[in-house]
Amino acid sequence: MGIISRGFSGRSREQNPELPPGQFLTEDFPVLSAGPTPRIDTDEWEFTISTEDGTVHRWSWADLMALPVEEVATDIHCVTRWSKLGTSWRGVSLDTLFAGIDTKYGYTMAHSYGGYTTNVPLADLLGGKAWIAFEFDGQPLDPEHGGPARLLIPHLYFWKSAKWVRGIQMHKGDDPGFWEQNGYNIYGDPWLEQRYS
Amino acid sequence: MTALAPTSVWKVGVVASVHTETPTGRSIMIDVPGWGGNLAGQHLDLRLTAPDGYQAVRSYSIASASSGDRVELAVDRLPDGEVSPYLVDELQPGDELELRGPLGGWFVWRPEQTEPVQLIGGGSGIVPLMAMARAHAASGSTARFRLLYSVRTPEDVFFKDELMAFASSAIEITWVYTRATPAGWATPAGRVSRDILTSSTIPANENPAVFVCGPTGFVETVADLLVELGHPAASVKTERFGGK
């Protein structure tokens, strides 16, 4: 426990067990982006998975829409300390996209339209833990929130859920992505409060 | 990354002074032994602890940029806020706060950068831009600096005197009033538009580094217009606060 702040009582005493340490609830959906919002037409949109032998697996928007779509109800946690509980998404599981992928590498780098990158261990993308999401709350995903499609990896801080995702590159090691090179944690588990490097 | 920067350690700061800046905001000088300085544009985590052990942590941009152990924050009171009303209405000189940082390595300006710099701030989004303006002045940098500062009314200007001093020397400043202007102001109140950006910011063909900070809606609008006006997205760094 830290030093007592004279005259501070705080607002809420409810310890919500759904909130990771150091997070507060928000009803809004704040935006955190490092630059302008890219506007990507679904006609031009493409998603790729690239492996160590140079193979590039490609999906157009129509290809993605033809895959099984899952409904995801989940809590999301931003490193800037807001959490939003019970959000609803629709998207395609990374298990589905990785079903035909042959790789021995254990790490991935997600790449976005606009140049953003973030690193995620492959194990965190598989096993029903991650999706390419294109709907939020029953509506097509806003560009501000990463539309037309973003990664959704709700068990990690939300900067790992790359907006405007366009591809995943397999990596041999856990190389840092954009925020990970700018002071943020290499893994980002909100329950362990892995915010900073 | 850098083993020598113990940013994960909470440090105790003592409030040296507070200054009312606007009807809803104040600046706060804090002495933090062991802080060791920060880059212009970085932020910190601030932690408050209630007598029963309850803690609240928020991130704030730092208005100062120096190598010393003093930091300046500027905080706007959010109507439903838990921490900002305490900082704006309650905190007094001599009070202790816990701070962690400096944090962030993206939305920063370093004095060794030589390209022109366009700062665009909305409301209390001026805070990290103020740190850059101060770093620019303190370093004697000859890089061209220009600021466009959007506020609701003349009363809502943070750091007015210091900005006026910069305006007469090192920085070209354009003021935009969205709800009410000073008496006799030539242009009516209105939001930042494409025309204003065209006439009052460094054009894309001069390849400026652009820093935009403010509420989400403001930053979205401005960043979109900048891209339309030919700025490469990679040259436009943004920092947003609040939901939409």
Image: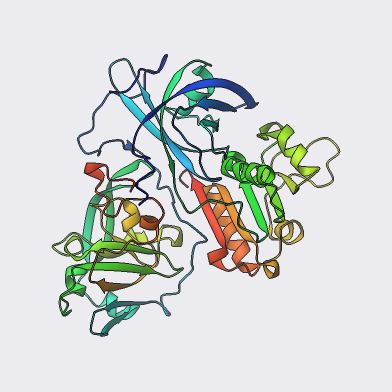
Q: Hey, which residue is sitting farthest front in the picture? A: B4
In the rendered view, tell whether residue A153 sits above or below residue A196: below
Residue pictured at 44% horizontal, 51% vertical: A31
In the rendered view, tell whether residue B24 sits above or below residue A163: above
Describe residue A165's horizontal placement relative to residue B153 as left or right. Answer: left
Residue pictured at 29% horizontal, 73% vertical: A169
Rendered image quadrant of residue A152? bottom left
Residue pictured at 54% horizontal, 57% vertical: B237
Pick the residue in front: B80 or B210: B210
Q: Quadrant of the N terminus of chain A?
A: top left
Pick the residue in front: A196 or A69: A196
Number of on-image labels: 0
- Give the percent coordinates (x, y) of residue B229: 66, 67
- Give the percent coordinates (x, y) of residue A143: 45, 62
Q: Identify the colour scheme used.
A: rainbow
- Give the percent coordinates (x, y) of residue A34: 47, 56
Pick the residue in front: B106 or B233: B106
- Give the percent coordinates (x, y) of residue A183: 39, 50
In the rendered view, tell whether residue A167 sits above or below residue A5: below
Residue pictured at 46% horizontal, 68% vertical: A114
Q: Can residue A93 be seen in the rendering of this structure?
A: no
Pick the residue in front: A125 or B105: B105
Q: Can residue A172 be seen in the rendering of this structure?
A: yes
